[in-house]
Amino acid sequence: MRVPFRFLLLALALCIPLPASAQKSDQVARTPQMGWNSWNTFGCNVDERMIREMADAMVASGMKDAGYEYINIDDCWHGTRDADGNIRPDPKTFPSGMKALADYVHARGLKLGIYSDAGNTTCAGRPGSRGHEYQDALAYARWGIDYVKYDWCDTKDINPASAYATMRDAIARTGRPMLFSICEWGDNKPWEWALDVGHSWRTTGDIYPCWSCEHNHGSWSSLGVLPILDKQAGLRKYAGPGRWNDMDMMEVGNGMTEEEDRAHFSLWAMLASPLIAGNDLRSMSEATRRILTHRGMIAINQDRLGIQAMKWIDEGEVELYLKPLDKGEYALLFLNRGDAAREYTLDWAFHYMKDDISKREIDFGHQRFAWRDVWHGGEGSTAQAFTATLPAHGVVVLRLAPR
Ligand code: GLA
């Protein structure tokens, strides 16, 4: 009897167990992750006392109650590897060890994140995880780590999809749910290969606390709010529960004007980006605290559908972003990119919206919504045209509910 070749293949596939790749945790990041990260303010100057103080400040400032959860240590916590290759925290800056720090953070109802790199060294020259992925993931799990940010320095000739999948597998095999945050700057289009690998992926190079600048560091530049926003074009369809386009840690409270900070926070919230504060929580101003803990904006970011806002109307200096929300609601953001305040009128009756992702259509000429101004209060209906003064480098955000 002749056995068809495809049956032979099937038999082979059934008999020979292939090493199944492990799954990323489906218990985390069902909505964009919220937390704090040390890099934007402290760079390499991290130590256990400051991290403990930041956990305390996250609770005392009301950020924890507003939904922030992760305290993330970025680069430079690492000491050397021991003779067996086990990574150890820097004994001078983290003398009590990571387990004690995780216990401290957990006792406050928060979670602890750590940072590593797919190459031999991190961006700041500390030991990377290349060749130590399983060993490092096990160490993190033993310490009680909840979040791994995985960077992309020193990775010449490494394939990004397999390097990140290796760490994903290593984390999964520990059995401890850890959020896996891919930080590869969008260079290799992670949205095309990372949906099952990480819970979020950076879409751009590093952020800089300015509105529209690109800050030149020589061989690379960091980006202000608008350049990062503009690089999100085309990425909306990749976002959803458990897989977010990461617009980088926020710079709220790090030097922009209050209006710019409010716009920055609102845009990150609308585009379903992780909300990771990057300022010093111990000494922030009341204005900064109010922006970071704004319940209305956070509810828009954390909406359970997890649909990223679309750029709905583009009129040059003014852009309108629309985010479908649960229960037929929407968030609508008016962005004024320009240097002068301007009056803007939206006559709903002439507008229509069709969206492939939420599978919704709105004909504002026939469907009525009640709106509420999320930042400033005030209510109205789409039965009348909406007019607002959009501040320079600022936003107005409405929440629309069907009626
Ligand atoms: C890269 C990352 C940053 C930060 C630094 C640390 O630049 O993109 O977010 O983690 O490395 O060295």
Image (spheres, rainbow, N blue to C red):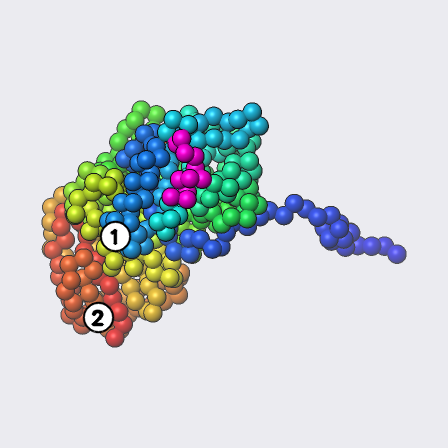
Q: Position of residue 315 (x, y in %)?
A: 21, 52
Q: Which residue is mark 1?
A: 62
Q: Position of residue 351 (x, y in %)?
A: 24, 65
The residue shown at (32%, 35%) is 49
Q: Which mark is residue 384?
A: none
Q: CA gap, disc 1 to disc 2?
A: 30 Å
Which is nearer the eye, 269 or 135?
135
Q: Secondary structure at mark 1?
A: loop
Q: Amino acid at mark 1?
A: Gly
Residue 192 in sight from this viewpoint: no
* Residue extent of the magenta highlight: 94-104
The residue shown at (38%, 48%) is 107
Quarter of the picture holding the C terminus: bottom left
The residue shown at (41%, 44%) is 103
The residue shown at (33%, 38%) is 51
Horizontal placement of 403 versus 7: left or right? left
Q: Position of residue 226 (x, y in %)?
A: 25, 43
Residue 263 inside the magenta-drawn segment:
no
Q: Is residue 96 above or below residue 311?
A: above
Q: Which residue is mark 2?
A: 370
User: Which quadrant of the figure has residue 283?
Assistant: top left
